[in-house]
Amino acid sequence: MYIIGVLLIFGILGSFADGNTDDNYMHFAVKKPQNIVLGDSRGAQAVLPELLSQKLGKEFDNFSLNVVQSPYGGIYYKALQRKLDPETKNGLFIVTVDPWNVSLDKNIKKESDFPEEHSPLKNMHFYDLSPNYEYLLKNYSRSWFKLYAEREAAGKSSTYLHKDGWMEVSVNMEKDSVAKRETEKVNFYRDLAKKQHISPTRIKALQDIIAFLKSKGTVCLVRIPASEKIMEIEKTYSPEFSETMKHIALKHGIHFFDFSSKGNEYQYTDGNHMYKESGKVFTAQIADSILGKTKNLK
């Protein structure tokens, strides 16, 4: 009886898991989508599925995590195959890129050492259960009582993952606070640029994903910008990145929308991630770009 009681308690607590639980849970607790956004944390914060749906007439899911857990590679590809509705025939897919989500540490030689080996994308089987006890058992390390105490009904967290996969970040946007966070990010990416290189394995995985999605609908490649300081780092790190993406798009017969020259048009929380209000503008621009190039989407 004691064990049954414990299981009942955990079952009840698990039912309170939501967008406050952590940065990933909701990706595994909603129905499988037919229209999807891929990428890292830039994409997670800058692309709002709700606005895409309003402008494009399709229901979207943002399946972007972060550069450690969802860089382009075999694990992300397999996770996408599990995530996407298998009945998808006329989907619309927005594949967001930046140099970092196709990069790898220069010292890593084996795929078994890739950082995403520790991602929930690696260990999860079920992507559409609510509550998703598999996720909680495998990937939630905090007390389950926190699921109740920090539930959405008690107030949204500063990093709130919506059911459609948009990561809403609410932080102090005063000039000094933003400048401090940007300085930290600039230092981080300067250091990262010394340690990493554009990975042929990741580029191949990106192309494999594009080919897979193209068989199920329309694919658009989108480069998301950052602040001027971080874009300068990217230009030095991979000066031919946009040309490489353009070549990949041409090879696969898809559209490439390159916003890298428009970085100064947006506001960022830390120089790397768009502030949510700028994300709304950016998302609308992506939708308009797609509408301008693609017919009969609805």
Image: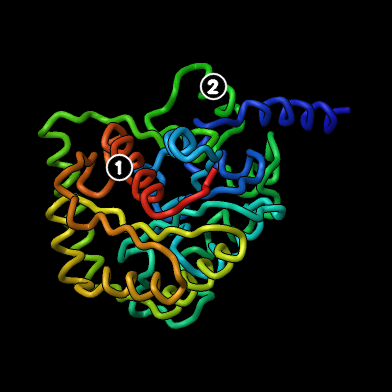
Considering every residue shown, the one lying at the far right of the view is 1
Q: Amino acid at mark 1?
A: Phe
Q: Which residue is mark 2?
A: 149
Considering every residue shown, the one lying at the far front of the view is 295
Of the pair 214 and 274, the residue shown nearer to us:
214
Question: Residue 223: image x %, image y %?
Answer: 31, 58
Q: Secondary structure at mark 2?
A: helix
223 in relation to 248, above or below: above
58 in relation to 7, above or below: below
Q: 174 left or right of 104?
A: left
Characterize the local packing of mark 2: few (<14), some (14-19) or many (20 or more) Cα atoms within 10 angstroms. few
Question: Residue 127: image x %, image y %?
Answer: 66, 48
Q: Residue at x 25, y 53 (%)?
A: 225
Q: 159 left or right of 174?
A: right
Which picture quadrant has residue 190? bottom left
Q: Amino acid at mark 2?
A: Ala
- Marks 1 and 2, the one that precedes in the sequence: 2
Q: Residue at x 57, y 58 (%)?
A: 217
Q: CA distance from mark 1 to mark 2?
A: 35 Å
Q: Which residue is mark 1?
A: 282
Which picture quadrant has residue 170? top left
Q: Residue at x 39, y 34 (%)?
A: 168
